[in-house]
Every structure is written in C-alpha cells, then in structure tokens.
C-alpha cells in the first residue's frame, strides 16, 4: 500500500513539474530574451550573451561570412563584436510567436573605420525554450548613412588589396633599393660606352 501511495505521489509531482515547466516556457517573452542578449553584448558580458544562445544556433549577418553555426562559432563572433566596442540601441521590437522582428541602431569601431558613425539594421530572431536559435540581421539601405557604409564595404570587396608599389617585385614582396637600380644602370651604360670605343678603334 505504501509503495502504491509513493508511486502515485511521484507521478503527480512529475506531472506538476512538467506542467509548471510548460507554463514558464509559454510565459517567456522572446523580445525580452533578445533585449537581454543586446544588453549583455553592450556591457561586454560574453558569458551573459552565450547563456541565452542555443547549442545549435545560427547567426546570419555581417559578422558571420559565411554563416556562423553552433555555439562555439557564435561565441567567437560575439567576442569579435565586444572587441570592436559594439553598441546596439533597439529602436523597435515585436514578437510573433517565437519570432522577434526588431530594428536597431548599431555602432562599433568597425563601422567607424569605414566612415559610418552608426548604421541601422533589421533583425529576425528565433527563440526556443528561452534560448536564441537564429540570430539574423540585414542592413537597412533606405537609411542614407547605412547605404553609404554598405557601398564602402562593397567597393573594398570589389577593389581588393591595393596594387604593390613599383619598388616591390611582383608576387614576391622583396623590396628593391632604388640606389641599387641606379648603380646597375650606370654599370650597363659604361659597358655600352666601352664597347662603342672598341668598335671604333677596330680596323676595317
């Protein structure tokens, strides 16, 4: 009898625990999760960011080319953001089920290095069981400053590295001292002059 009562108690406790967990998950606000990640990154709290990232999460944005897949890859990308003093201000955010749509103003050393004090980005974020599984954002090129930043990035990607200066041998990186070139030219000139003298003194 005692065993039956104990078994029923355990079953009831398990059912209640599962129900409570389901209610808690249902009450998780995806927008709040997104905002917590934004705040943690702004504060340079990498562990705080990663505590809200799922193990199989995917990141799709300028920091991940190609996409970052998995927690380790996302950790490296968010660390890079923190190293670049990344700051985001959420301008608007709303959720539809587990999906968050947001708009934010972004600032970082990387943006400033390309002439943009700030850019505007639109976010699409998926949240499952209180953890982010998709972090995706695209630049809003309707914003003039953001459009100028994107044009700069595209121009750099098209142009590539600048051409090597003339004092550098192609594809070797070996520097050539201009004085050495002048000396070689002088030797060649003298040799040519001597050859002409010998040619003129030779009887016909």
Image (cartoon, rainbow, N blue to C red):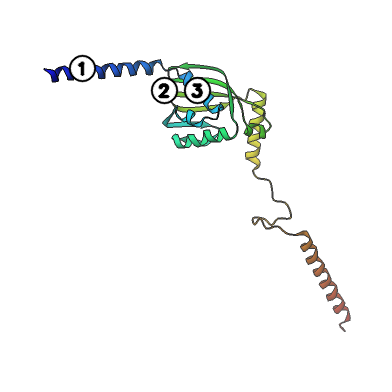
Residue mark closest to the camera, 3 vs 1: 1
Question: From this viewpoint, is residue 15 visible?
Answer: yes
Neighbourhood count class around disc 3 (C-alpha, 10 Å): few under 14, some 14–19, many 20 upward? some
Please state which of residues 7 and 202 is positioned toward the viewer in this rendering.
Answer: 7
Q: Which residue is mark 1?
A: 9
Q: Which residue is mark 3?
A: 36
The quarter of the image holding the C terminus is bottom right
Please state which of residues 37 and 5 is positioned toward the viewer in this rendering.
Answer: 5
Q: Residue at x 25, y 18 (%)?
A: 13
Please state which of residues 171 and 46 is positioned toward the viewer in this rendering.
Answer: 46
Q: CA distance from mark 2 to mark 1?
A: 29 Å
Residue 136 coordinates in the image, percent (x, y): 51, 28
Q: Is residue 168 left or right of residue 82?
A: right
Q: Which residue is mark 2?
A: 130
Indicate which disc residue 44 carries. Answer: none
Q: CA distance from mark 3 to mark 1?
A: 38 Å
Residue 80 coordinates in the image, percent (x, y): 55, 36
Disc 3 or 1, which lies upstream in sequence? Answer: 1
Check the image and report above or below for 86 versus 190.
Answer: above
């Amino acid at each position: 009898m005692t065993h039956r009562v104990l078994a029923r108690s355990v079953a009831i406790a398990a059912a209640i625990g599962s129900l409570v967990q389901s209610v808690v998950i249902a009450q998780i606000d995806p927008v709040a999760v997104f905002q917590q990640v934004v705040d943690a990154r702004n504060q340079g709290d990498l562990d705080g960011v990663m505590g809200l990232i799922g193990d199989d999460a995917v990141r799709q944005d300028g920091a991940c080319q190609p996409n970052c897949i998995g927690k380790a890859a996302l950790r490296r990308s968010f660390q890079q953001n923190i190293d670049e003093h990344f700051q985001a201000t959420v301008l608007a955010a709303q959720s539809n089920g587990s999906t968050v749509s947001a708009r934010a103003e972004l600032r970082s050393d990387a943006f400033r290095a390309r002439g943009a004090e700030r850019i505007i980005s639109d976010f699409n974020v998926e949240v499952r069981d209180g953890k982010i599984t998709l972090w995706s954002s695209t630049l809003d090129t309707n914003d003039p400053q953001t459009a100028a930043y994107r044009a700069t990035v595209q121009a750099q990607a098209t142009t590539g590295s600048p051409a090597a200066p003339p004092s550098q041998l192609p594809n070797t990186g070996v520097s050539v001292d201009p004085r050495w070139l002048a000396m070689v030219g002088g030797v060649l000139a003298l040799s040519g002059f001597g050859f002409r003298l010998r040619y003129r003194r030779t009887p016909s």
